[in-house]
Image (cartoon, helix red, strand yellow):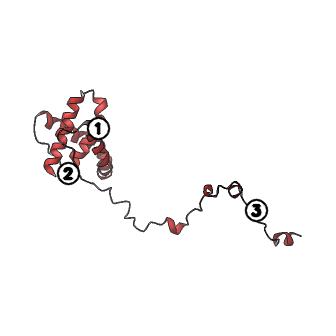
Amino acid sequence: MSASASNAPRISRPGIFEWTGLQFLRPSARPSMSELVAPMITGFEAPYPLVLPLGQELPSERASLLEIGEFIARFDPTRHFREHWGERYRDDIRKLWSDCVSAYRCSRRAAAAPGELLLCLAYDWRLGPCLGMAEHEKLAFLRWLLAQIRARI
């Protein structure tokens, strides 16, 4: 009896998606493992690349906070330096930021590479609301960092 029941032809009935006319909502088939294999993976040991802006991509000398924020969002190097510095990241970023602030206050040239200055710009942008500085003072420091980057690119 069970053998004849398993050989019986299966009657195909429309599912709920076909019955309601919403076939486009039917979940698509999951990709096979061969489709999930990415042949271009370079390896986990390769750090996230540092992308420096071109000279014309830097905000102008009179850039507003909004323009500087948009620039930082496009060229934020935080991930690169987190992977590059590893466990030292917190200490190194604090030291870098402190060195840049002291150079700004003493009207000296910052002794950092363009990528590190870009990181300092992003770090200061995030710290900004917590430092309690006036907006015009914060804007002057961010513009100074941009001028330092511009001089090195």
Q: Earlier in the sequence, mark 1 or mark 2?
A: 2
Q: Earlier in the sequence, mark 3 or mark 1?
A: 3
Which residue is label 1 attached to?
A: 66
The crowd level at tag 2 (other Cα within 10 Å; few <14, some 14-19, many 20+) is few
Residue 76 position in % (x across, y down): 30, 47
Residue 34 position in % (x across, y down): 52, 69
Residue 9 position in % (x across, y down): 80, 71
In this picture, residue 17 sits left or right of residue 74: right
Q: Amino acid at mark 2?
A: Gln
Helix, strand or loop under label 1: helix
* Disc 1 to disc 2, C-alpha distance: 17 Å
| Residue furthest to the front | 21
In this picture, residue 141 sits left or right of residue 33: left
In this picture, residue 33 sits left or right of residue 151: right
Which residue is label 2 attached to?
A: 56
Q: Is residue 99 visible?
A: no
Query: Residue 140's quadrant in the figure?
Result: top left
* Disc 3 to disc 1, C-alpha distance: 58 Å
Query: Residue 89's quadrant in the figure?
Result: top left
Residue 32 position in % (x across, y down): 55, 66
Which residue is label 3 attached to?
A: 13
The crowd level at tag 3 (other Cα within 10 Å; few <14, some 14-19, many 20+) is few
The crowd level at tag 1 (other Cα within 10 Å; few <14, some 14-19, many 20+) is few
